Image: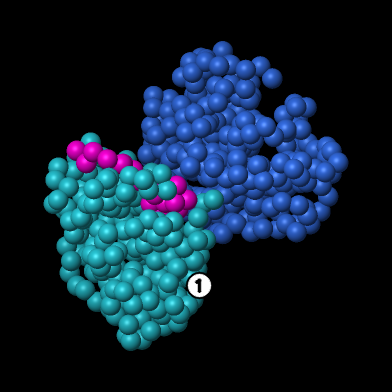
Chain colours: A blue, B cyan
Amino acid sequence: MPIDTRHPREIRADIRSGKLSGITAGLGQNFAQANLAVLPKDHAYDFLLFCQRNPRPCPLIEVTDVGSPEPVGVAPGADLRTDIPRYRIYKDGVVADEVTDVTPYWRDDLVAFLLGCSFTFEWALLDAGIRLWHVEQGKNVAMWRTNVQCRPAGVFHGPMVVSMRPIASSQLSKAVTASARFPNAHGAPVHIGDPAAIGVKDIAKPDWGDAQAFKPGDVPVFWACGVTPQAVALASRPPFMITHSPGHMFITDVPNSQLAAL
Amino acid sequence: MPIDTRHPREIRADIRSGKLSGITAGLGQNFAQANLAVLPKDHAYDFLLFCQRNPRPCPLIEVTDVGSPEPVGVAPGADLRTDIPRYRIYKDGVVADEVTDVTPYWRDDLVAFLLGCSFTFEWALLDAGIRLWHVEQGKNVAMWRTNVQCRPAGVFHGPMVVSMRPIASSQLSKAVTASARFPNAHGAPVHIGDPAAIGVKDIAKPDWGDAQAFKPGDVPVFWACGVTPQAVALASRPPFMITHSPGHMFITDVPNSQLAAL
């Protein structure tokens, strides 16, 4: 995986000018990346409340002022209309367009939500000496819809989505403590072991992403997943919504280490 | 201090019936208590966003559905209109009434916010063997308005209020780690040492509460304070707001230990 160690400001400038347009894995080494969800003010209260009630799958790290595309808390000077490589425009819950600049779609009543991303806790896991199969193989994690219902808020409701990584049983404790330090990036695992207990029927057949390979002694470890808020928001078929395209994240000015709670 | 070790459900029943009407310190030993702020839906988005942007002073542990007085997340079956010993009714930012039952004031457009309370981290400090002068003396903590501005949200803005406890220098590390585990109850100190650095001019003259006594080697330690959200909300003079009366908190069904992030 190519690593771009420049400051996120410089990388975002290249994204804004169109010089960079691919996925953001490996860009802005050790700076936190974020999921984007943009909704009209009419839906923003329910979505904000949904995130507050479901912090594991929906760890909010920034909410912009109504109409403003500047995430002043995590990247002052950035512009969320242009500084993400690729966006999806949803109308009534269906993809209507995929673009590299949402300026033509921007409105005065929009609120942008940035949510912490698994890259941050994966960095913490790797840093703690934990091997991650999908990183070594250049694959995606495996993700499932569970039978665990999120606590609803207004129009938003639905099941929690989880990602799964096989972890050596000797490293389970370390995996918990290393990720638990980052509640703003999904935090500790929500489940360790038996997939059936959370409604995952076939560990070899994920709902999204790639099936993972288990080594002898590996245990399936499940974390709340950032797909949850998007899936939940879209399930309610909002008339208008903007998200990043999968893998094309927003790169903040906040070092991963600074997102640590302790 | 008298200790009432019954389950919060039983204590709240006595509060509801009028049998208990005093301050809640010592009631429901080891169960988390919470600050109350009730605002009309019109102001709820800005207040929710203010709390999201300022989690240290405003640690949200529950937000009710619009019009519902039941905090289903932290005390299912409880009624926030009757289960707090004493309330204040504010009109245009000024106390208009002080009552033991807000049922006559309740409206279909109200949203109740419960915020974590310093009792939780003080329990963690005491549990870690840290002596707290104000607890030993039956006094209040000392509180100041600082020169640290909260990040504004909509109509809400203002300085952070802090509480201060003198801590023996040999116990500073323990005080940080013990309280840091409870981000939903203000978390780690926001400042340790020099009061002037955060705009506290006279350590002997608090803006609220009692001046604290320092033993040789004690260092002033400042935590974000739950007075902040009320002060900030009232400064914007909302037409209507309900809060608990100082010291008369809501007792949740959540054990303090369960609020721990790690």
Residue B82 lies, with reference to residue A113, above or below; the image says below
Quarter-of-image position of residue B217: top left
Q: Position of residue A28 (x, y in %)?
A: 55, 21
Question: Residue shown at 27%/56% (left/top)?
Answer: B227
Task: Point out the image quarter for the N terminus of chain A.
Answer: top right
Identify the residue at the far front of this view.
B216
Work out whether residue B234 or residue A15 is closer to the camera in this orientation and state it: B234
Disc 1 marks which amino acid? Pro
Residue A245 lies, with reference to residue B246, above or below; the image says above
Q: Position of residue B112 (x, y in %)?
A: 38, 64
Question: Residue shown at 29%/80% (left/top)?
Answer: B21
Q: Which residue is mark 1?
A: B76
Does residue B150 appear anywhere in the picture?
no
Does residue A253 appear anywhere in the picture?
yes
- Magenta range: B175-196
Mark count: 1
Work out whether residue B124 or residue B31 is closer to the camera in this orientation and state it: B124
Work out whether residue A138 or residue B165 is closer to the camera in this orientation and state it: B165
Question: With B222 as the anchor, is B31 left or right in this view?
Answer: right
Please give the chain letter of the residue carrying mark 1. B
Question: With B116 as the anchor, is A96 left or right in this view?
Answer: right
Q: Position of residue B166 (x, y in %)?
A: 27, 51
